[in-house]
Image (cartoon, rainbow, N blue to C red):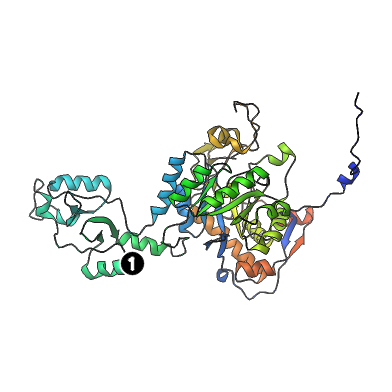
Amino acid sequence: MTAYMANESEPFSEKLRVPEALTFDDVLLRPKESHVEPDEANTASHVSKNVEVNVPVLTAAMDTVTESDMAIAMARHGGLGVMHRNMTVDEMVSEIERVKQADELIIRDVVTASPDQTVREVDEMMGRQGVSGAPVVSDDGEVLGIISGTDIRPYLEVGESDAVREAMTDEVITANEDVTPREALELMYEHKIERVPVVDDENRLVGLVTMAGILQRREYDSAARDEDGHLRAGVAVGPFELDRARAADEAGADVLFIDCAHAHNRDVIDSAREIKDEVDADVVVGNIGTREAARDVIDFADGVKVGIGPGSICTTRVVTGAGMPQITAIAQVADVASQHGVPVIADGGIRYSGDAIKAIAAGADAVMLGSYFAGTDEAPGRVITMNGKKYKQYRGMGSVGAMKSGGGDRYLKDDEDGEEFVPEGVEAATPYKGTLESELHQLVGGMQSGMGYVGAESIPEFKERAEFVRVSSAGQQESHPHDVVITDEAPNYSPES
């Protein structure tokens, strides 16, 4: 009979000598002398080694937060949307391409007309497609003319049954594929037209440039764009999904995010390293929460994502007993990552703009939010009504619903068939908030105000100047509105948060 042998390497009582870890409510920024007005603060930062954004904010890779609509809106306003992976590879490729083509100067999918169609047929076609004009092309794609609504109005000497060749404008102003926005706009102003067909060397149609498209690009002058002027796109891939990673890379994704609840796992690290070797896109590894984890991935990662259980719908800490309060987690990872020029993304736990700028002060280069944006129009979650108020569906990727939809490999299954999950998240609802633009304006504005209190004009300067003070429970209570009944809520503060 084998006797029980006690572990003599370390007394169990020593485990009670535990270090302290802090989160957002435990600290405040120490105000300093400042000559910086909030609207002068520059929030440009990096989300990975090679991808810079004008707004250091990312939307979470969750199926009730980020698909192509959210990614497009985020990139247009200077941030980055990270699309979830609860979709097939083909669906993912389609979503990435939709983001990349959203603000393309040259429209590739052009509505065209045939010279033999009747005026009525083309008029009805343009009405169905929602366009006011169309290039007229031959069977082999050669541009013969262009027809617009003004060419077929009833007051002109053109009948509904006449052929398009009788009504079209045959003196067409065209441009080559290397046309710049300025050159295209000058052509339109000079010839008083609203669209320019783009042709190849043999005068075959390859696309269309419109004045509306150029003006839209000008509207989003702070957009996050790649070297070719396309909107930036982020996408999540599993740590063992090499084929998905390759497909995302080929589709044009700028950053691949290794989507893992606990990335400080040797198999995950080895697989993430293999993915990095196989793709051109930057690879961000996460989630981690300690300096030891940072040391193990820093040699190949283009960025690291921090957060073990801080999300509003995450139950990791109470289900597993494991986690790290977010301010301490960010600081520990940043201690290592900053020495190697690897950006840090703080993922989860942010309820207010003040939390976001505290994350930057602790060492993050950007922040990722889920519930904050889940209630916006651009989020894919469905709108529901409860007690007369509108909400949008929001669920953790560790919830049963998300796991059944395809994300179950992130967490433990209780049997070989995968029918019994051990979830680390819940399904919930978040108040409907309106447009992403409005929410992002409040978030970034609050972050700029925080930079102003510290006297920093840029993110790097802010990280250098920022200092924390500890806050007691009384101080935490004092930080919020108190001893009053709120009659009108501010757009950037809700007691429900």
Tell me, yes or no, if residue 378 can be seen here: no
Q: Residue 344, how many percent across, how many down?
A: 63, 57
247 relative position to 60: left or right: left
Q: Residue 272, how many percent across, how many down?
A: 59, 48
Tell me, yes or no, if residue 325 can be seen here: yes
Q: Residue 17, how many percent across, how many down?
A: 87, 49
Q: Residue at the spot x=25%, y=64% of the render? A: 175
The image quarter in which residue 403 lies = top right
Q: Residue at the spot x=39%, y=62% of the render? A: 217
Nearer-the-camera pick, 98 or 150: 98
Q: What amino acid does circle 1 point to?
A: Thr
331 relative position to 429: left or right: right
Quarter occupied by the N terminus = top right
The image quarter in which residue 39 lies = bottom right
Tell me: residue 284, above or below residue 29.
above
Number of labels in the image equals: 1
**What secondary structure is found at the residue carrying circle 1?**
loop
Determine crowd level at label 1: few under 14, some 14-19, many 20+ residues with C-alpha closer than 10 A: some
Disc 1: which residue:
180
